[in-house]
Amino acid sequence: MSNTKSPHLHPPPPAAGLFQDDEPLDRPTAPPQGPAANGGRGLVLSTQCEFPAVGRFTSRDRFAVLVHAKAPSDVSRAPLDLVTVLDVSDSMKGEKLALLKQAMCFVIDQLGPADRLSVVTFSNDASRLTRLARMSDAGKASAKIAVESLAVQGFTNIKQGIHVAAEVLAGRREKNVVAGMILLSDGHDNCGGTSVRPDGTKSYVNLVPPSLTVAAGSSRPAAPIHTFGFGTSHDAGAMHAVAEATGGTFSFVGDEAAIQDSFARCVGGLLSVAVQEARVAVTCLHRGVHVQQVKSGAYVSHVGADGHAATIDVGELYDGEERRFLVLVHVPRARSTEEVTRLIKASCTYREAATGQAARKVAAPAAVVQRPLELATLPAPSLDVERERVRLAAAEDIAAARTAADGGQNAGAARILESRLKAVEQSAPGAAGNDPTCEAIKEELRDLSARVGDRAEYQQTGRACLLAGMSSHAQQRASGMDVVPQSTSASKGGGSAYLTPKMEEMVEMSRESSRKRGGGGQHQQQTVGTSGQVKQAKIEV
């Protein structure tokens, strides 16, 4: 990124199908067939009610039922088509470029002969450095030569970089089952990719071509863009907007030396996709029960006109990855002889990525509540449901704090986060002090509160941290940036929300690679801004 005023460069977009030279797929002679390829393991779906009982002659609105989906673990993986879109503008010179080259070489080393990689770079314009080629030994060698040849120049044309990458994927003659993009930039698009709205805020709608966006009511795109804001001068709003529009995650890499670990976490997920096209269906089982709302974050949900059915488009799940959704229903008064009310039934159709088999279906046991004549005491709420309520409320207040801080109300933003922190501490799962999820949320809120109160700190790191948190919570997927407790007495169980074992394994491989290079993983001890550090622990729910 350069702060110098630039001419508005508008290079013509590539013609559709410009890149039709992707290397043919490496097709196995005996592809895995059916459930046996994954050891018979499949997606697990369950439901849990907010309370086990509701008085027989009482009705309840917005009664919460938790729907929990978990992908199978340690299963065969599908090959990947990966396009990396890399900023090589003037501001990437020196140590930044050297760190990027190291990180890219690590990524190349992790890809297998069935995976394919294309490298796209952008500065004033954008160019495809390598075609989409299989990462055989020869393919890896060629890719590394291309990466080592990277040199900086000019301005920052993020829009054209994304458009060229989109053409790489659109022009494929053959397609691997899994596809994804990694976009890295340390600056602001200064080549006409953004515009200013009448209210003075930036619009990023032109950065992403329609072929890559998540259209309302449709399935999630096959190639999400996982974005990385590199350093403290990038446009966090642009990176977050691109990720949000395409179903990817936004990661803030404030400590530039952590870029390899951040890439490793992302690639660890992309190389472990276990489930695709997952779609949860909810059906009401009692004529008086109807769905009032579905809390699904970034995942498109639809409630039928009569409220008797709902769906959630989940899309891809990594190996061992989990998703939680709250379905809020109306529970009617029961009949005088009705001892149990059957509320909803949840099912999920999906496709196993490794086998490519037709959609499979799994169903959870029906969610039911007891209907006693009288409730002498209110039953204890489900801790799992309460934990999800805590997470959702924290995510909503992180977004509210971002809005306040962007409007110049930094003290108000800090108060929002501090108030939410107190609420988490007083919640049923948070009060015990040993719930890993709540402890991690507490540390996140403390760190974010410290970053938003001061205007300078907010502009340097706070906005990016808030947006990275919003992205991670909305997707229920680990991003490449997390914070660790500043106190050494922090809980041992706290850590990076949504981190999967495969992501952890890849990060550890990255650290081992750094140790062998003599880096010693020292970036793990550096702070980002004035508060917080990169953290690597895992939340275990």
Image: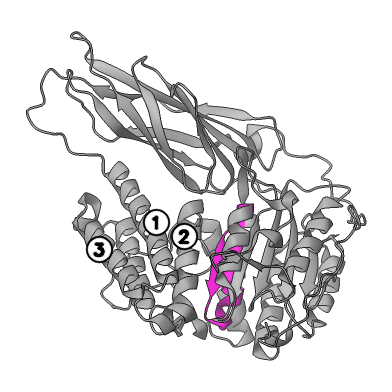
Amino acid on which disc 1 is placed: Ala
Amino acid on which disc 3 is placed: Ser
The colour style of the image is: one colour
Contact? badges 2 and 1 (CB < 8 Å):
yes
Which residue is label 3 attached to?
A: 419
Q: Position of residue 207 (x, y in %)?
A: 70, 62
Outermost residue on the top side: it is 337
Give the CA distance from mark 2 to mark 1: 6 Å
Contact? badges 1 and 3 (CB < 8 Å):
no
Q: Is residue 508 magenta?
A: no
Choose between 458 and 505: the one closer to the eye.
458
Give the CA distance from mark 3 to mark 2: 18 Å
Amino acid on which disc 2 is placed: Met
Which residue is label 2 attached to?
A: 470
Decide which of tag 3 and tag 2 comes sooner along the chain. 3
Picture residue at 79% right of the left edge, 85% below the top: 151
Q: Position of residue 316 (x, y in %)?
A: 60, 45
The residues colored magenta run 246-269
Picture residue at 45% right of the left edge, 63% below the top: 469
Choose between 125 and 272: the one closer to the eye.
125
Q: Is residue 266 magenta?
A: yes
* Element carrying mark 2: helix
Q: Quadrant of the N terminus?
A: bottom right
Q: Which mark is residue 177?
A: none
Q: Position of residue 449 (x, y in %)?
A: 33, 72
Is the residue marked by circle 3 packed among few (<14), some (14-19), or many (20+) residues within 10 Å? few
* Element carrying mark 3: helix
Decide which of tag 2 and tag 1 comes sooner along the chain. 1
